[in-house]
């Protein structure tokens, strides 16, 4: 079948979005031809994968080295009780195939490291940062810059979320343009358990899928902004105009104007602090 | 003396340093000593219009309840904090040298890592 | 087990949200004791159910009379290809049980009518409007007023969405306070196919779940606002301060000050206009 | 004569009546004939400050491209349309009698039914 054609059943499956101004047959074919990699199949990755798959993105990569745990299920809605113990990437892939058997799904059951990042990410058009730690966020940003791909980045904590597309177009900043110096490990609370409400990750992950679909179909206006979400504030959403690419950025700056060296970055994950032991608390109360 | 009314917001966990309160309304003088940090001593007679650097020290001295090192580092906000002036990244507005205007809304937000 | 206790495994399952300020054991017990009915298991109902279930809402009702169709799957992420032809309420219930086996799920496989609405809705604490037509929206609002329950209302079309809690507290307006006169059927395009992007319904449905969780746990500030979302605008979200309850409202107004009579309302669905036949278009192009 | 710069937004499908464009920047006179609807004829000499009812007719006569009956009905916006004045429901601001100020943002949005 030619690249300009869709199978008949796809017209029925995607009809509700194909009649939208700005999508149409052309947009649907772009979605089918697109490949997107989601790094992290957790609270953000699950809803992002769900709506990317449902919309008909042709190829989805899933990178995650963790296995499903009971404590994930309050927000990671592609996993389930009977999948506890299996790799999250595998569990998410099964759910994605159920949502849309037409998607090609590739699982990468490994941690993203400076050794494998470029190899894994090079195969995809767009990268989604759905991770849960600062070092991987820097690694993903630096890799997206090297590969010249947009990075649709989500983050969520407690009742708050943030969303930004880094390395967007000619002039969009990278993560390092905004945050040149990684916070010292003590400052990020060594990933101590801060808590998170599932619906908050759902909203941010969903918005990541939406921004990705806008990028693929050409509906994005190309202006980088930072979206802040706070579930308990009014108004809950705030859109921020952000700086352009910094010529002095160590990662994406201009040749000869760069200051600093990203090769010095120690991406080794420093996560793994203790979690409040609710099981012990429970047995005390129960 | 003329003064400026400002709306201050903290987010991304920074509010924990400020009585766990996200929104604050404050009033600061329109003209301030040329050296923003009161701890520098020797204020002299020189004055400047109140700017964001002055505000940062003012917040430290008047609203911050704990762990100053999580807010200020080397004379600016610590790495990982973004300052937003009326919904615009402060880097587009002159960073610490932005001169405050009556009614401005300044947001200090910490970048989130979770997912 | 006493009402103030949770089984041990629930501490593990919900730990990440129980450590949040404002939730804790107390909030989790409130979620467990709560009952929520979702009217419409489509584009909005699916994501709303998903995050309500994951968060541990004890009892979920699902009202829908439709069966799953292929054209739903681009956005109705609780259904799947192998469930085409079965009732949506049934399909959604199966998915909800998979997300959280601890939820009690009640299916109501019927259209909501003025005859059965009060009976069905009376059993629940909070009502979610996830429907797709104007008459049912008026019926739900009038029923919520009669029952004295909050109505968490979502709507989505094309690239846009709207969210509002009607009948909130003492002073919150009902749907009729904002829109006293239903638009004439011709004005709503007789539900002709307008198209919808899945991620847009996802975001609104997700926000409906979030607002419901805030209501149950006492984290909502009680101020009624209207949230407008437009996926292609910048900023995409806008929060609107809305009027209080109108003393003259035909549905929720004060005794003796009411103007008009809701009994005149013809809630009979006027939907069912023709859809663009993509199957025919497809076979012409293919 | 003094004039007012306004930002106008249409949403919920209403933009289809206005060249399929959601955002418009317009300028209207600050003082207008006491009868807002030019079609009423007989304007007389009386004037009033420009209000939202005047704006509604101005939009009909200057920006609306088709199907007037989907915008105006019986001298007000048709049922199902909400008017928002600087992010506030117009009913809290005096509805059609709200006097426009320079820089105001007025949104006309149609309620959505889909799901
Ligand atoms: Zn950069
Ligand atoms: Zn009412």
Image (tube, coloured by chain):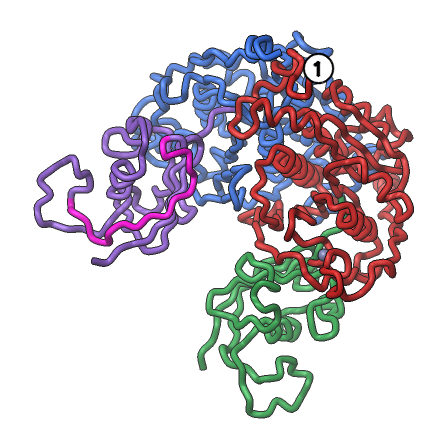
Chain colours: A blue, B purple, C red, D green
> Which of the 4 quarters of the picture holds residue B40?
top left
Tell me if residue B26 is in the magenta stretch: yes
Specify the quadrant of the image occupied by residue A25: top right
Where residue D47 sits: x, y (%)? 54, 85
> Which of C228 and A175 lies nearest the eye of the viewer?
C228
Q: Is residue A236 left or right of residue D62?
A: left
| Residue A104: image location, x then y, percent | 71, 21
Q: Residue at x 71, y 34 (%)?
A: C48
Q: Residue at (70%, 75%) from the top-left corner?
A: D75
Q: Chain of mark 1?
A: C
Quadrant location, the C terminus of chain D: top right
A142 horizontally vs C183: left or right: left
Which residue corresponds to mark 1?
Answer: C1
Q: Looking at this view, is C147 or A231 the one in front?
A: C147
Magenta residues, start to end: B17-34
Ligand 2, by image quadrant, is bottom right
Q: Residue D91, relative to residue B47: is it above or below?
A: below
Residue A140 spot, x, y in % from top left: 48, 23
What secondary structure is marked by label 1? Answer: loop
The foreground one among A260 and C76 is C76
Q: Is residue A85 covered in magenta?
A: no
Q: Residue at x 30, y 42 (%)?
A: B95
Residue A136, given in percent of the width and then of the height, sits at 47, 19
- Quarter the N terminus of chain D occupies: bottom left
Q: Is residue A76 above or below residue A34?
A: above
């Amino acid at each position: 079948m030619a690249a300009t054609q869709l199978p008949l059943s796809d017209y029925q499956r995607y009809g509700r979005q194909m009649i939208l101004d700005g999508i149409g047959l052309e947009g649907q074919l772009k979605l089918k031809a697109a490949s997107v990699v989601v790094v992290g199949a957790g609270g953000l990755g699950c809803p992002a994968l769900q709506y990317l798959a449902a919309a008909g993105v042709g190829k989805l990569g899933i990178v995650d080295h963790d296995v499903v745990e009971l404590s994930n299920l309050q927000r990671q809605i592609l996993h389930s009780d009977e999948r506890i113990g299996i790799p999250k990437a595998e569990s998410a892939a099964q759910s994605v195939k159920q949502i849309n058997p037409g998607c090609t799904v590739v699982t990468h059951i490994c941690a993203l490291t400076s050794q494998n990042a470029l190899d894994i990410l090079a195969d995809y058009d767009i990268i989604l940062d759905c991770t849960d730690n600062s070092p991987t966020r820097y690694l993903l940003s630096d890799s997206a810059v090297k590969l010249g791909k947009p990075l649709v980045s989500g983050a969520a904590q407690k009742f708050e979320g943030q969303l930004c597309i880094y390395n967007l177009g000619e002039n969009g900043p990278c993560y390092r343009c905004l945050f040149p110096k990684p916070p010292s490990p003590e400052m990020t609370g060594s990933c101590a358990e801060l808590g998170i409400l599932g619906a908050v990750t759902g909203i941010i992950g969903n918005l990541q899928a939406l921004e990705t679909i806008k990028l693929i179909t050409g509906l994005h206006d190309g202006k980088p902004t930072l979206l802040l979400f706070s579930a308990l504030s009014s108004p809950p959403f705030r859109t921020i105009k952000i700086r352009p690419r910094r010529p002095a950025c160590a990662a994406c700056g201009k040749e000869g104007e760069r200051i600093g060296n990203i090769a010095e970055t120690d991406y080794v994950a420093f996560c793994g602090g203790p979690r409040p032991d609710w099981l012990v608390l429970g047995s005390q109360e129960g | 003396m003329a003064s400026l009314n400002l709306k201050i917001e903290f987010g991304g966990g920074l509010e924990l340093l400020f009585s766990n309160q996200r929104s604050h309304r404050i009033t600061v003088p329109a003209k301030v000593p040329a050296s923003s940090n009161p701890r520098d001593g020797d204020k002299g007679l020189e004055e400047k219009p109140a700017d964001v650097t002055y505000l940062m020290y003012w917040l430290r001295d008047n609203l911050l309840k704990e762990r100053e090192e999580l807010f200020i580092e080397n004379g600016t906000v610590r790495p990982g904090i973004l300052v937003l002036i009326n919904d615009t990244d402060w880097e587009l507005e002159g960073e610490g040298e932005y001169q405050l205007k009556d009614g401005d809304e300044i947001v200090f937000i910490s970048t989130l890592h979770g997912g």
